[in-house]
Image: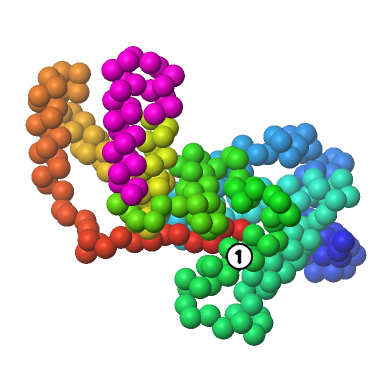
Amino acid sequence: MSRKADKPKRGSDPAPRGIDRLLDVVRRLRGEGGCPWDREQTLASLKRYLIEESYELLDAVDSGDPGRHREELGDVLLQIAMQAQIRREEGAFGFDDVAEAVAAKLIRRHPHVFGDVTVAGSAEVLRNWERIKAEERRPAGGSALAGVPRHLPALHRAERVQACAARVGFDWERVGDVKGKIEEELRELAAAMAAADAARIEEELGDLLFSIVNLCRFLGVHPEDALDGTTAKFTKRFQAIERMLAREGRGLQDCTPAELDARWNAVKRREKPDRAGGKAISRRGRNA
């Protein structure tokens, strides 16, 4: 296990910069005389911060602001440095070991760049990536679903589970079959609602959502992106209605349902069409 680059700078060496400076700062925060809060942190306590910082990074990417993007990348990198430092204190590995491992993985999974494999395009690159990953991670006799993280958001996790099952042949043959499954789940949900069976309603709603995720996968649409886009669209329209009513000295609670519907439709009519030529855009990528 390499620790060479994890050693703090000594003597007359120039002041560290970049990643070396960050690692020195983290070591000091965690060391004797460091910050009490940082010294108290554990791998378990840091989990929530990694998730929060990751979502803030996504917001920064969407903002288009390079300064904000740089800052949020740094916040995520800090979380990685903190976890690596805790493992270093345990004698398990250091930050350099993390960087070396991911570099080796990238070389291993890109035989068309670092080896003599020839590929026809990005689709074949993705197939090779998933095949190599499966060979690395799946133990003999292990489940094809074993590599799907338990803590993924539910829609994303459903998509990953379905994709893993599809790679071993467990999948629908045509998109029409998926549409038929959605219609079947809608009928079963209606029956559960008619019976006022709360547990069955929850189960059938889950089945319906799972089937819709399957349709997204067949159409090359990421369900998280699709739902996030619709939520953003709803938020924009809702807030437009709030502003419209505020100019009149009123609130939503002052309107009848029919008036709110009329306001909603008015806001909707003012929107410019935003379509990508009717083409489905696939955002599927590689998962580490």
Can you see residue 55?
no
Percent coordinates x, y for residue 226 in the rendering: 35, 48
Which quarter of the figure has residue 274? bottom left
Locate residue 55, reporting x and y percent.
51, 45
Viewer-side residue, 128 vs 40 = 128
Q: Quadrant of residue 282?
A: bottom left
Percent x, y for residue 39?
A: 79, 38
Q: Residues within 10 Å of mark 1 (few under 14, many from 20)?
A: few
**Disc 1 residue type (three-letter):** Arg
**Residue located at (33% from left, 27% from top):** 189
Instruction: Tell me what residue is drawn at x 28 percent, y 38 percent.
Output: 183
In the figure, is residue 202 to the left or right of 138?
Answer: left
Could you tell me residue 240's position as x and y percent?
20, 37
- Quadrant assignment for the N terminus: bottom right
The magenta-colored residue range is 177-204
Q: Is residue 190 among the parts visible in the rendering?
A: yes
User: Against 267, is 259 above or below?
Assistant: above
Residue 66 or 122: which is nearer the viewer? Answer: 122
Q: Secondary structure at mark 1?
A: helix
Judge whether residue 183 is colored magenta: yes
Q: Is residue 98 left or right of residue 10?
A: left
Q: How is the image coloured?
A: rainbow
The rendered magenta stretch, by its main secondary structure, is classed as: helix
Residue that sits furthest to the top in the current view: 196
In magenta stretch: residue 37 = no
Residue topped by disc 1: 131
- In the picture, measured across the screen, residue 150 lies left or right of residue 85, that is left
Q: Is residue 143 left or right of residue 216?
A: right
Question: Which residue: 31% across, 20% down?
Answer: 193
